Image (tube, rainbow, N blue to C red):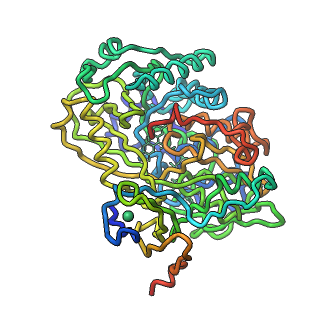
Amino acid sequence: MQRYSGFGLLKHSLSHHENWQRAWRNPKPKKHYDVIIIGGGGHGLATAYYLAKEHNITNVAVIEKGYLGGGNTARNTTIVRSNYLWDEAAHLYEHAMNLWEGLSQDLNYNVMFSQRGVLNLGHTLQDMRDIQRRVNANRLNGIDGEVLDTQQVQEIVPLMDCSANTRYPVLGASWQPRAGVARHDAVAWGYARGADSYGVDLIQQTEVVDLIIEDGAITGVKTDRHGIISAGRVGSVVAGNSGVMAKKAGFELPLESHPLQALVSEPIKPVLDTVVMSNHVHGYVSQSDKGDLVIGAGIDGYNGYGQRGSYGTIEHTVQAIIELFPMFSRVRMNRQWGGIVDTCPDACPIISETPVENLFFNCGWGTGGFKATPGSGHVFAATLAKGKAHPLAKPFSMYRFHDGALIDEHGAAGVAH
Amino acid sequence: MLSIYCPHCGEHREEEEFHPKGQAHIVRPLDPESCSDKEWGQYLYFRKNTRGLHHELWVHAAGCRKFFNITRDTVSYEIREVYLIGEQPSVTSDRAQS
Ligand SMILES: Cc1cc2nc3c(=O)[nH]c(=O)nc-3n(C[C@H](O)[C@H](O)[C@H](O)COP(=O)(O)OP(=O)(O)OC[C@H]3O[C@@H](n4cnc5c(N)ncnc54)[C@H](O)[C@@H]3O)c2cc1C
Ligand SMILES: [Zn+2]
């Protein structure tokens, strides 16, 4: 793999940047792999990378029906934080946070991880009590967090209307300084390049149309372009399409797929150097390095695979954002889009063995899985390598919906992000 | 935005007046006490999550507040039929369309 550096940039400028090596190969698939990963989003690519790097399993293919990172990985609003309430979730997301902090160096790829802090606003007495409880729980788990009052919030975001004259006055917030944003595409590309350098085959424009299951165990996948490819183990990481994949394997999942929308404005001068989220009025906003305001909406209530949602949903979000930031009322919106998110009844993911032997699922990240990308890939790689759940993944088995050990993160995941 | 026909009000109204309530025709076990954990968990949480024709429950929340069923395509979002609780859907496969 060609290493990227400032010196390299200088050197290649002499040849007008025309001789850079391709970031990854575009190989023909082999007949057999030790592990096949279905879905080349951030989570699938991270899984392949850690399988090779940490477990020495390099006879691996990632099969993606479109292009790498073109699903929710390309569609999200890139918020990264780890301030979840319950121990199980907090440990998983904090594991991801620790990996984020060294990710650009590890991948030799700038994922533009920017720890600019995240505010979760409280607008009611109950919001503030919940925030206090969550921040206390976070601190006991060694995760940074502070409870701020209105004045302190105003100091961090002078632009925001923190007066008492609003319909839902800002009473305070939780503040995680280590949280922030990262460049979504770079995360997919960095992991793809890293995995490829260990010999992982990235097979794009190839859809898995069926699963080959014999005597209750998976032996391979059927694809639309390359026929049947056999595998020792298979990991499904297809986000919104997980229900479709489970059906091919003959079981149901406790998931529903919904459209989730986001929108960005025209680029404007820097005005917002942190991330502001509000569960109560339901909206969140940050400003990208390019200058556009990145705004996330809520999910549409109905099931949908259309990668678009209802207008009423973004209208509500924009109302909330303008209530908080009256100054944004004149900003023009540039683009709006939707992704299909697979939501779980307890707002936590599923990283799990399944009724089919050697078939594992990583899904249910719903509206908030971008932040978990490195951690999810890391624990799922271990799960696939060992054939049983990594200790951090164990509480997230799909069978928790049989035995009742749900991990209710609706509070910490209350706003769709 | 969807325009939804409420069979109780006998009118098309805007989507915002309605709430989707998920998969229809889920039968509550007659004797919950005798269910295994697995049976009860399946009933509570596991769903078809169909890509394509989906039979689902809706409520006219800001209208008559009554429930009814819709058969809808979850990719095109096209509403194929509306029918009352207790009735069975007549559109059950994509072929029925032509
Ligand atoms: C609008 C929006 C905003 C969001 N904001 C945030 C946020 O601020 N912070 C946060 O943490 N999370 C956020 N999320 C959630 C986050 O995007 C997802 O949880 C995360 O990106 C999931 O990653 P993934 O790799 O599992 O899925 P994806 O990136 O969707 O990858 C799945 C891949 O599987 C492929 N696939 C599907 N079926 C098949 C098949 N049969 N064969 C082959 N390939 C297949 C798809 O093409 C896709 O590329 C947001 C999501 C949306 C839609
Ligand atoms: Zn009605």
Determine the residue positioned at 57% across, 39% down: A194
Does residue A157 appear left or right of residue A55 in this picture? left
Residue lying furthest bottom in this view?
A: B98
Residue in the foreground of this view, choosing between A344 and A265: A344
Residue in the foreground of this view, choosing between A363 and A416: A416
Determine the residue positioned at 48% across, 48% down: A69
Does residue A134 appear left or right of residue A61 in this picture? left
Looking at the rendered image, the quarter that the C terminus of chain A falls into is top left
Looking at the rendered image, the quarter that the N terminus of chain A falls into is top right
Residue A80 on image: x %, y %: 48, 31
Does the image show residue A92?
yes
Instruction: Answer with the quarter of the image where residue A161 lies.
Output: top left
Residue B59 on image: x %, y %: 44, 59
Does the image show residue A52?
no
* Number of numbered discs on residues: 0
Residue A118 on image: x %, y %: 42, 24
Residue lying furthest right in this view?
A: A215
Task: Examine the rendered structure and indicate whether residue B3 appears above or below residue A175.
Answer: below
Residue A202 on image: x %, y %: 57, 52
Task: Examine the rendered structure and indicate whether residue A348 appears above or below residue A402.
Answer: above
Residue in the foreground of this view, choosing between B26 and B87: B87
Residue in the foreground of this view, choosing between A271 and A156: A156
